[in-house]
Amino acid sequence: MTLTDRVAAIFEKVFGIEASTFSPTLAPEDVLRWDSLGHMTLVMELEDTFGVHFDVDELTELNSGGRVIEMLRAKGVKD
């Protein structure tokens, strides 16, 4: 399973969207449940799943599906 597939599965779990609708351009305004609480739930799920930690200043940078993947890769997460 690729990193994109794994992130798509997390978006499905957290936001209740079909994993097949995940894309790099997916943004909070495209997902009904991607509000502040949903965002923190996403962050916690990403940290637990991938064993990474996002600093407070990085949280606002997680603003699209593609950016989530970029930041995970920057933290050493591989496909």
Image (cartoon, helix red, strand yellow):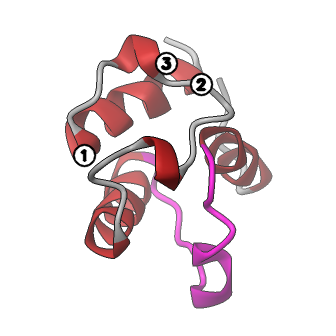
The residues tagged by marks 3 and 1 sit, at their Cα atoms, a distance apart of 14 Å
Check residue 23 in the rendering and tell me which mark sits there, or answer none.
2
The residues tagged by marks 3 and 2 sit, at their Cα atoms, a distance apart of 10 Å
Residue 46 lies, in percent from the top left, at 42, 53
Label 1's element? helix
Check residue 38 in the rendering and tell me which mark sits there, or answer none.
none
**Which of label 3 and label 1 is nearer to you?**
1
Q: Which comes before the other along the chain, label 3 or label 2?
A: 3
Residue type highlighted by circle 2:
Ser
Residue 77 lies, in percent from the top left, at 65, 42
From what the image shows, is residue 54 above or below residue 3? Answer: below
Badge 2: how crowded within 10 Å, few (<14), some, or many (20+)? some
Circles 3 and 2, Cβ within 8 Å, touching? The answer is no
Residue, x 66% and y 76% (percent of image)? 58
From what the image shows, is residue 13 above or below residue 75? Answer: above
Q: In the rendered view of the protein, which quadrant contains the C terminus?
A: top right
User: What stretch of residues is rendered in magenta?
Assistant: 50-64
Magenta stretch containing residue 15, yes or no?
Answer: no
Q: Which comes before the other along the chain, label 3 or label 1?
A: 3
Q: Which residue is mark 1?
A: 14
Residue 2 lies, in percent from the top left, at 57, 16
Q: Which comes before the other along the chain, label 1 or label 2?
A: 1
Residue type highlighted by circle 1:
Val
- Which SS does the magenta portion mostly show? loop
Badge 3: how crowded within 10 Å, few (<14), some, or many (20+)? some
Residue, x 36% and y 37% (percent of image)? 11
Q: Is 3 left, or right, of 35 in this rendering?
A: right
Q: Which residue is mark 3?
A: 5
Residue 42 lies, in percent from the top left, at 36, 57
